[in-house]
Structure formats: C-alpha cells, structure tokens
Amino acid sequence: MSSNFSESQARDAVLDAQERLHEGRRNFFKVLGVGATAASGLGAALHSTPALAYGGPYAAAFGLDPGRTFMNIGTTGSTPIAVLKALAANNALIARDPTMTFNTQDMRNIIAPGFGADPFELVMSFNTTDGMSKILNGMQFNAGDEIITTNMEHPGGNSPMAITADRRGVVLKRINLPTNDAYSDATVLARFQALLTGNTKAIVFSSPPYLTGIRLPEKMLCQWAAAQGLASVIDGAHGPGMLALNFHDIGCDFYAGAGHKWQCGPGQTGILYVRNNTTPAAPTTYTKSVTIGGETRTLTLPGYTNTTALRPFWPTISGGYSMVAGSTLQGGVRDPADNVAATLMSIGNPSYPALRALQECCSMWDSWGRQNIENYIVALAQYLRSRLTAIWGSRCLATVYDANTPHHARIALTSFNPFSPGYDYNAVLSPAQATAQTAASNAAVATLRDTHAVVVRNTAVPHSLRGNPAANADPTTMSHPLRISTHLFHNMADVDNLVAKLLLVVPHP
Ligand SMILES: Cc1ncc(COP(=O)(O)O)c(C=O)c1O
C-alpha cells in the first residue's frame, strides 16, 4: 500500500462526500428560514474569540468556541444554535404557562423512520446509560443464565450487567476484542461462538466500543444470536447522529444510544430501541398511519431481519404500567400492537423542551441526509487515519488503515497510539511501561488542549498483544492511545491542524 496514494484517495473521498452534503445544507437553511451568514452570526454572538477552527460543511450551524478545535464528540456533542434558541424559547413558554405539554408521540412519529424503527419501538430516553439500565433490568433472567459480552464495555453497560449478575445470579462471560492486525469481524464472531453454552441467553456488546472506536459487525452478531435463540443488546452510544442506522435491518432486540453525543441533542437525551414485532420479514416494507401536528401521515418502514419470538420484557421505570390483564407490557408480555415506547417514556413530568430539541436535531440530520452525514464524517476519519498511517506507520491505529473503508472502519472515532514502542498499537508493555505511557498520554491530552487548542481524549485499552494475538493486555499493561472524533463541523484543514499539533506534542519517527 502506498500511503501517498491512500492519502490522496482519502482526500478525494472527503471532497466527494462534502459535495453530496451541499444539497442537504441548502435545504437545511431553507427549512430554518435563515441564511448561512445569519447562522454564523449567531454563532459568533455566543463567543468573543476570533474564529480559528471549523471549516466543515455545517460549521456555521454550531456555536462551538472558534478559539479551539473540539474533537471529543465521543464524550458529548454540541447542540446546533437554532435548536438551542428553540430550547430556550420553549423553556420560557413553559415557565409562562406551566400547564403546557408537548406531544411526545408526534416527536417519535417524526424521528423513528430515520432510525429504521417503528414509532411504537422508539423511546426518547435520557442517555445511553439510562437505556442500557432499562434494557438489562427489564429483561427476564434466571440464576445461572449467561450473557456473553466483551472486555471493552463502558460502565454505562457494565454497571447494569453487574447488577444483573449480583441480583439475579446471571453469569457474565467476556470475549477479548482484537485490535490492529489481530482484528477481523470473523475473529469477533468466532470468539462469541466459542463462549456459547446451553445457558447462554443474550449477547451484549458496544459498537463501537468506546476504548478503540472499532465498529463491530452488528448485523452479523445479531443474526447469529437470533439463530441461536439469544437476545441481542447493543450499546450504541455513538451510533445516533454518526451512522445511518436501520434497527430493523440490524436485527437487534435492543439498542441504547446517546442523543447528546453525535446526534448533538441537549444533555440527558438518548435514543432507545426495543424490537416489538416479527412481521413483516425483510426485505418487505410496511406502512403505518400516524398523526403529526394533527395531520395524518403514512410512514413507510423497513421489515424485520430478526423474526424470532419476542421475549418477556418489563418496564423498570414507568408510570404507565398497569396490572390490568392485556395492558402494555403487563406480565412482561410484548404484544406487537402495543405502544411499548409510550409506556417506557411515561416517567412523570419530562423536560418537553429537551425532548423537542432532540427531535429537532434528528429532523435536521434527516433533512441533511443521514447516509450523506455518515459518508462525510467517516471519509474525514479515513483521511485522518491515512495521514497518521503515512507518518506513524500501519501499526499505530486500533485497526490497520484500509483505503477501501471496510465495515469496521465505517466509524468517525479514531484510536491512535504514538506512545508504544515502534508506534505499535499492539505492543507488549511491561507494567512500568504502561504506567509511563498513561502519564505521557495524559500529558499529551493536556498539552494539546492547553497549548495547542485541540481537544481530544485518551482511553486505557486492553489491546491485543503483538507476541500473542489471541490474548489481550491485562489491567497492569494496558496501553493509553488518543481518541479523536471527526464530525460535521470539521474539514480536512481541521484534521491537518490536528496532525501538525500532534507532531509537536507526541513521539514521532
Ligand atoms: C460505549 C459507551 N456506552 C455508554 C456511554 C455512556 O453514555 P451516556 O453519557 O449517553 O450515558 C458511553 C459514553 O462515552 C460510551 O462510549
């Protein structure tokens, strides 16, 4: 592979994807009734420092501090200016008339098709942790049941799994996720398969895991789980807003994502999906008549790739549960006719303005085109990876750079390790080297932020071991790579700026 060739190919891919976003961008400003100039004026009004960063196609829609380049959307995003204004106005409306309510079913009717879900299955939750807790505490488990999960889960998923283990006697079994050239989708599947026993009831995995940003083969894993009679749970914290998701096609039983990360909704917003039907089977589509703003609309929704029976599921937080036989989720029974999402969202008085803001962000993304967004931000991440590979070599990333963008690279998170010997993501570290690397990595994050105005984060990763790809580093020898997020407000100049700053801050050849 010639890295120069890859770099120019990656550059062309970004320009192509950017071109396709332009049409959506024009529509967006038309919908808002504001011009691009007006929108950037609003952004400037929110801060006083001169514009330095952000040249992305939608940079003007966001009020990020232009004095620095924020590249940690993986932790949380930035709510678009127009949505913030509406959020403030809606809060003021409710303060003026506290009896005011907003129609949350309308919101679900608007956003569910953008996620390949039925509005009855799509819950506007509080965040990923909330979604994972509702899923794992709501599923039916008995003592001795087994869950297969991974060694790279986030506390938002690990914590409810731990409660399930301690409270109900569920056994957690973990596969090691491979990294760099030890990674392949087939290896991941084989490791899940190797832990299957007669007691296995579910698989739980995050895609991408927050530690590496490697996208796992969600559909392959869910189809395998369905074929074994297992439930599938995805911690998709980073999915909404980054990826063009189609839950019916993925075939998962449950998916918990954030609304406040890549989807750029306000804090404490999330997207939770609960499969609640088995028909029609994909590729057939179906229509559903809904009302939005009092008007009847017909939604066209994708059929289900997972047509296995619906297992019992209980709402754990709900003011909408009743012991009346046949009511929604009564006795854990899932009736496809029921509006499961409404029952799961019935939690006292919500923040209507925050929910509306999440819906507005989703509507923006729908109008810009979710596939176009994914294509652009993944292309930008690929450009970044091509540049890092050209300088630090093919071992420096969580996955080896591949100009063909395989499924596992269709992700806008990049995990990069310039700190290990040989710039090798999978280098075997001694405990002393691991400790020194943690300090070096923390210092680099701080210097990038404080001296060079670039915000990234780092993670502690139990990477595969170069000397034994079947094993992963133990907690005393984990590596500490940097994790970089690229989004709609960035462009190649922002990536080039990051790489230039990295060359000043981290070890390089
Ligand atoms: C994989 C994963 N799961 C869960 C979470 C928790 O997210 P939230 O703040 O939406 O609860 C994160 C946050 O970074 C994450 O990366």
Image (cartoon, grey):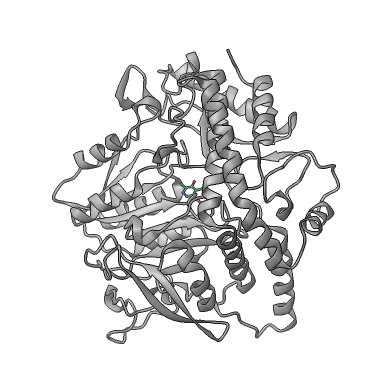
Residue nearest the viewer, comparing 475 with 29? 29
Q: x and y percent of residue 34 in the render?
A: 76, 64
Residue nearest the viewer, comparing 344 with 317? 344
Q: x and y percent of residue 359 in the render?
A: 57, 67
- Quadrant of the rendering where the N terminus is positioned: top left
Q: x and y percent of residue 80 in the render?
A: 68, 57
The answer to whether 222 is drawn above or below residue 350 in the figure is: above
- Quadrant of the rendering where the C terminus is positioned: top right
Image point 47% across, 39% down: which residue? 213
Image point 35% across, 50% down: which residue? 162
The answer to whether 32 is drawn above or below residue 23 in the figure is: below
Residue 373 visible in this rendered orientation of the protein:
yes
Residue 482 visible in this rendered orientation of the protein:
no
The answer to whether 202 appears left or right of 486 in the picture is left
Image point 22% across, 63% down: which residue? 308
Q: In which image quadrant can residue 331 be found?
A: bottom left
Residue nearest the viewer, comparing 403 with 319? 403
The answer to whether 76 appears left or right of 67 in the picture is left
The answer to whether 147 is drawn above or below residue 327 in the figure is: above
The answer to whether 417 appears left or right of 204 in the picture is right
Q: In which image quadrant can residue 503 be found?
A: top right
Q: In which image quadrant can residue 349 be found?
A: bottom right
* Tally of numbered tags: 0
Q: x and y percent of residue 97 in the render?
A: 71, 84
The residue most toward the left is: 198
The answer to whether 320 appears left or right of 386 in the picture is left
